Image (cartoon, rainbow, N blue to C red):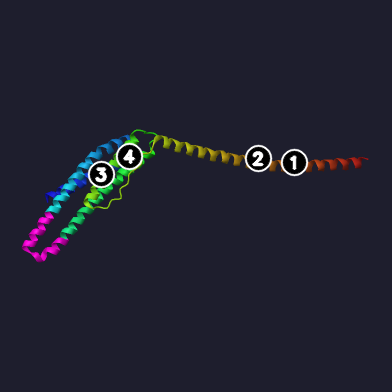
Amino acid sequence: MTIARTQAYALRQLDALADKMQRETKIGDLATTAKDAEPKAQEWLTVLARCFQLQDAIAVLELDRVLDVSPEELDRHRLGLRAARQNRLNLISRSTGHLVARMNAAADTANTKVLLHPTRSPAVVQSSNRLSAGVHDFHERLGIESGGRSSETRRWADAATEARNRALETGAKGVGAARTLGSETLDRAGSVKKVFSSEITERLRRLRGNDEEHAERAE
């Protein structure tokens, strides 16, 4: 029971670290929290590994005891211990996986703000990668399947280049739209001009016709 309580406490501490990472929104606070979380997470992973080792050792002692007292119950007891072990693995995997997911999300957020925070953003990514590597190694030792990934630190120059390209692309679209609008306006103006010219020509023709008719009558 002491080992089980210690394991549960360690899992709660890892969950608390993940929740704290999730609450942070400012890069400065995120960098500080990620830096603090890295050594704390390693400590609690060590506690979990020791708990798991002790629980396996106790399971062996239990099987030896059952073999001596009730050999016919050995298989059933072994199946029960195996199920309990898998349940512990699932709990550990869920908590550690949640922590890694929050660290990766923090790294992604930091990479999107590297232009404004060229020093703190890479620090968040590096802390995330080190913690993820530690969890991945921990999973391997316990036999937990781990799909850990590392986040690539986004360079300030790359982010600046991408921002410039987006601005140029947006500007080019704006110029193209202005040209299109200008062409359409000129076309409409030309059409209106033609209409007005036609009307004026028709009116002049009618006026000349009327003048000629009056002149003939006067004669």
> Which mark is drawn over residue 125?
4
Q: Which amino acid does label 2 sit on?
A: Leu
Closest to the camera, between mark 2 and mark 3, is: 3
Q: Position of residue 218 (x, y in %)?
A: 91, 40
Closest to the camera, between mark 1 and mark 3, is: 3
Disc 1 residue crowd, few under 14, some 14–19, many 20+, Cα 10 Å: few
Q: Is residue 58 left or right of residue 95?
A: left
Q: What residue type is labelled 3?
A: Gly
* Contact check, label 2 and label 3, Cβ < 8 Å: no
Closest to the camera, between mark 4 and mark 3, is: 3
In the rendered image, the vertical position of residue 182 relative to residue 81, given as above or below: above
C-alpha distance separating marks 4 and 2: 54 Å
* Contact check, label 4 and label 2, Cβ < 8 Å: no
* Contact check, label 1 and label 3, Cβ < 8 Å: no
C-alpha distance separating marks 4 and 3: 14 Å
Residues shaded magenta: 58-79
**Is residue 202 shown in magenta?**
no
Disc 4 residue crowd, few under 14, some 14–19, many 20+, Cα 10 Å: many
Disc 2 residue crowd, few under 14, some 14–19, many 20+, Cα 10 Å: few
Mark positioned earlier in the residue sequence (1 or 3): 3
- Pick whichever, 169 or 64, lies toward us: 64
Q: Where is residue 153 in the image (x, y as percent from the top left)?
A: 36, 39
Q: What element carries label 2?
A: helix
> Which mark is drawn over residue 134?
3
Instruction: State the residue position of label 2.
Output: 186
Mark positioned earlier in the residue sequence (4 or 1): 4
Q: Is mark 4 on a helix, strand or loop?
A: helix
- Number of marks in the image? 4
Q: What element carries label 1?
A: helix
C-alpha distance separating marks 2 and 3: 67 Å
> Which mark is drawn over residue 197?
1
Mark positioned earlier in the residue sequence (4 or 2): 4
